[in-house]
Image (cartoon, rainbow, N blue to C red):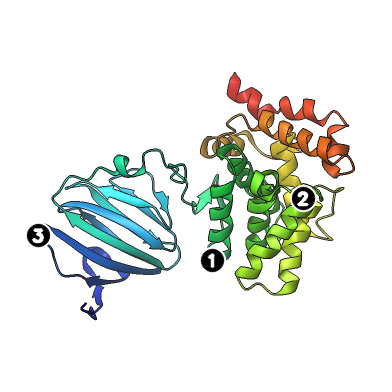
């Protein structure tokens, strides 16, 4: 075995900023580099000389080819650029990437075929419908857990719930803890999924416990962990004033707008269309009604049971965004 200490080289070509690379010894027609791009930096616009694989190991960023819209990338994302494709990379957080350049054919589809964990477009975006998503370990972890355990319809609901809530706050000039709201939104319904479904407590309470566990691993102090759990639990309780608890109110606004259409008139049509275009509903209403009815049947004293007894299911199934999409 040999251990090599590869020097790091700062890269300033192509108007790059905050980029450093370690170049590994070349093998045949293939070369491998380890790239690090500081948050806010960019690997400037340039053409691929050979076929290039760009595999994100850590952090979040955006990539662009030609004049196409920027695409989000995160851990596990692999980008394939063909020779001559002009591209650029931006780092939202510190970004670590393995870059492979080769003249060989690369069949990515054969590597990912049949793997449920690989989902097109699953990388966390920087913004949705004009609403920024927070950066950092907590947001990345919450996004990853939601994307891995929720089905696409439920995952999209969690994203839309955050965006609705954050947009509502922004329109009113309300200051709020964006990271806390985002983590709560990503996790608030995960106790409806089989791995986290509790047979003894209501799903929102089980979701609160899940939030405590995840945020403990992130090093959040006890008070902040309790807040994440509280916001999740309160989304299934009576209305909370934003003057008393702004994050809980925002999750209530977001989930109500997305599930039953309550308060949807507060959001303009263009915003709603952009949000649903980015994160389609995918038959969410019908699947979600079934999930809550199952909770009500198995836990007759829970908040879901009280909700389903009010005719809520009919309102959810007649959601205006589903009617707009169908015709």
Residue linked to disc 3? 28
Q: Is residue 154 above or below residue 49?
A: above
Residue linked to disc 1? 137
Q: Earlier in the sequence, mark 1 or mark 2?
A: 1
Q: Is residue 20 left or right of residue 261?
A: left
Residue at (15% x, 70% y) in the render: 25
Residue at (73% x, 59% y) in the render: 209
User: How far from the left and from the top, in percent, is residue 237?
Assistant: 85, 48
User: How far from the left and from the top, in percent, is residue 64?
Assistant: 33, 50
Q: Is residue 299 left or right of residue 285?
A: right
Q: Secondary structure at mark 2?
A: helix
Q: Which part of the image, by quadrant, shows the C terminus?
A: top right
Q: Which mark is residue 204?
A: 2
Q: Earlier in the sequence, mark 3 or mark 2?
A: 3
Q: Quadrant of residue 1?
A: bottom left
Instruction: Give the distance between the C-alpha atoms of the residues marked 3 and 2, in whole angstroms.
Output: 56 Å
Residue at (53% x, 59% y) in the render: 140
Q: Secondary structure at mark 3?
A: loop
Q: Which is more toward the observer, 115 or 64?
A: 115
| Tag 3 near tag 1, CB within 8 Å | no
**Mark 1 neighbour density, 10 Å: few (under 14) some (14–19) many (20 or more):** some
**Mark 2 neighbour density, 10 Å: few (under 14) some (14–19) many (20 or more):** many
**Mark 3 neighbour density, 10 Å: few (under 14) some (14–19) many (20 or more):** few
Residue at (53% x, 54% y) in the render: 144
Q: Which mark is residue 320?
A: none
């Amino acid at each position: 075995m040999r251990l090599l200490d590869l020097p790091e080289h700062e890269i300033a070509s192509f108007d790059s900023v905050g980029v450093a690379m370690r170049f590994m010894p070349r093998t045949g027609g293939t070369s491998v580099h380890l790239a690090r791009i500081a948050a806010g930096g960019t690997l400037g616009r340039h053409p691929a000389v050979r076929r290039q694989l760009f595999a994100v190991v850590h952090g979040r960023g955006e990539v662009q080819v030609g004049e196409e819209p920027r695409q989000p990338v995160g851990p596990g994302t692999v980008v394939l650029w063909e020779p001559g494709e002009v591209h650029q990379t931006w780092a939202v957080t510190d970004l670590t990437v393995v870059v492979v350049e080769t003249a060989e054919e690369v069949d990515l589809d054969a590597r990912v075929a049949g793997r449920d964990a690989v989902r097109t477009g699953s990388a966390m975006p920087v913004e949705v419908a004009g609403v920024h998503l927070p950066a950092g370990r907590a947001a990345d972890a919450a996004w990853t857990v939601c994307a891995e355990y929720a089905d696409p319809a439920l995952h999209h609901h969690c994203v839309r719930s955050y965006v609705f809530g954050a947009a509502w706050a922004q329109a009113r000039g309300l200051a709020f803890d964006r990271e806390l709201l985002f983590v709560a939104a990503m996790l608030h319904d995960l106790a409806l999924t089989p791995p986290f479904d509790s047979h003894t407590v209501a799903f929102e309470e089980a979701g609160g416990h899940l939030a405590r566990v995840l945020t403990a691993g992130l090093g959040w102090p006890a008070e902040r962990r309790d807040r994440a759990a509280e916001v999740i639990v309160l989304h299934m309780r009576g209305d909370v004033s934003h003057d008393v608890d702004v994050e809980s109110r925002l999750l209530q606004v977001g989930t109500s707008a997305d599930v039953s259409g309550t308060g949807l008139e507060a959001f303009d049509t263009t915003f709603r269309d952009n949000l649903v275009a980015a994160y389609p509903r995918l038959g969410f209403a019908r699947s979600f009604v079934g999930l809550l009815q199952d909770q009500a049947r198995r836990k007759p004293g829970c908040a879901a049971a009280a909700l389903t007894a009010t005719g809520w299911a009919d309102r959810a199934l007649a959601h205006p965004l589903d009617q707009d999409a169908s015709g």
